[in-house]
Image: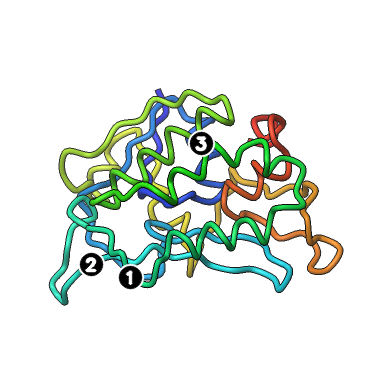
């Protein structure tokens, strides 16, 4: 059985969902320390002005806080801001209206913990794409030594928002995007980009 070790994500990139689809078992790390500017609380979309990052504000002190303990902040009405950004970016896409009613509740309901929010999103997105991954969460921090002595493939740093590492398994093939005529094809954006543009065919891309 093949196992992929992943970080939690907020509407994660296509590469992350590829692992959910292609691996027999996916293990999501919840005992790592939170870091800023990662896919844990950030997704990247394509807009008329180019790439835009949408970040969920979180509450944390200077002390290291585990991902599983991270609380979502209500700062700056981010839910409304994010939904408006998605509407602006994808209202002309073929499938935005088709999926809008399924996704809009995530920008209305308040979740206390980021991990719970991300997991609810993951379940819904998997349902919409029609994939059924075997997902579990770590019961302790998985060290480099542990995964090297097991059958786990560690993608926690490979799928990285700031400094992605090579991934021979992922080939960002082109698909139609709303603003491709302006910016060219933008690879490995949020799964929402694939979903809104490709709809039910998203599974074939993965």
Locate residue 52: give its quadrant: bottom right
- Taking depth in this image into account, of 121 and 148 the one nearest to the observer is 121
Q: Position of residue 164 (x, y in %)?
A: 51, 62
> Horizontally, is 87 left or right of 110 in the view?
right
Q: On residue 75, which mark appears?
A: 1
Q: In the structure shown, which secondary structural element does the residue marked by tag 1 occupy?
A: helix
Q: Which mark is residue 125?
A: 3
CA distance separating discs 3 and 2: 25 Å
Q: Residue at x 60, y 57 (%)?
A: 86
Disc 1 to disc 2: CB gap under 8 Å: no
Asked whether the beta carbons under mark 3 and mark 2 sit within 8 Å of each other, the answer is no
N-terminal-most mark, 3 or 1: 1
Image-based side of 1 in relation to 176, left or right: left
Q: Residue furthest right?
A: 181
Q: Would residue 155 appear left or right of 30 to someone viewing this image?
A: right
Looking at the rendered image, the quarter that the C terminus falls into is top right
Q: Which residue is under mark 2?
A: 59
Whole-percent x and y of residue 121? Answer: 43, 41
Where is the N terminus found, in terms of image quarters?
A: top left
Task: Name the mark nearer the viewer: 1 or 2.
Answer: 1
Judge the density around disc 2: few (<14), some (14-19), many (≥20) Cα neighbours within 10 Å. some
- Please tell me which residue is depicted at 53% across the width and 30% down the height of the picture: 22
x, y percent for residue 185: 77, 59
Q: Marks 1 and 2, how far apart in space? A: 9 Å
Vertical placement of residue 55 versus 148, above or below: below
Q: Position of residue 181 (x, y in %)?
A: 86, 63
How many residues crowd around disc 3 within 10 Å: few (fewer than 14), some, or many (20 or more)?
many
User: Mark 3 or mark 1, which is nearer to you?
Assistant: 1
Dot 1 or dot 2, earlier in sequence: 2
């Amino acid at each position: 059985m093949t196992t992929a070790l992943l970080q939690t994500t907020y509407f994660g990139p296509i590469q992350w969902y590829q692992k959910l689809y292609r691996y027999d078992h996916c293990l999501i790390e919840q005992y790592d320390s939170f870091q800023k500017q990662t896919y844990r609380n950030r997704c990247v979309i394509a807009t008329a002005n180019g790439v835009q990052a949408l970040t969920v504000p979180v509450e944390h002190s200077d002390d290291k806080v585990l991902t599983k303990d991270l609380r979502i902040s209500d700062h700056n009405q981010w839910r409304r801001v994010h939904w408006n950004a998605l509407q602006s970016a994808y209202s002309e896409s073929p499938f935005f209206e088709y999926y809008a009613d399924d996704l809009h509740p995530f920008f209305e309901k308040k979740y206390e913990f980021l991990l719970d929010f991300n997991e609810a999103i993951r379940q819904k997105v998997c349902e919409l794409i029609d994939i059924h991954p075997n997902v579990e969460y770590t019961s302790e921090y998985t060290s480099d030594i542990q995964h090297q002595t097991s059958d786990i493939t560690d993608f926690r740093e490979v799928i990285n928002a700031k400094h992605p590492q090579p991934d021979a398994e992922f080939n960002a093939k082109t698909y139609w995007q709303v603003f491709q005529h302006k910016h060219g094809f933008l690879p490995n954006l949020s799964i929402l980009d694939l979903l809104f543009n490709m709809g039910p065919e998203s599974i074939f891309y993965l």
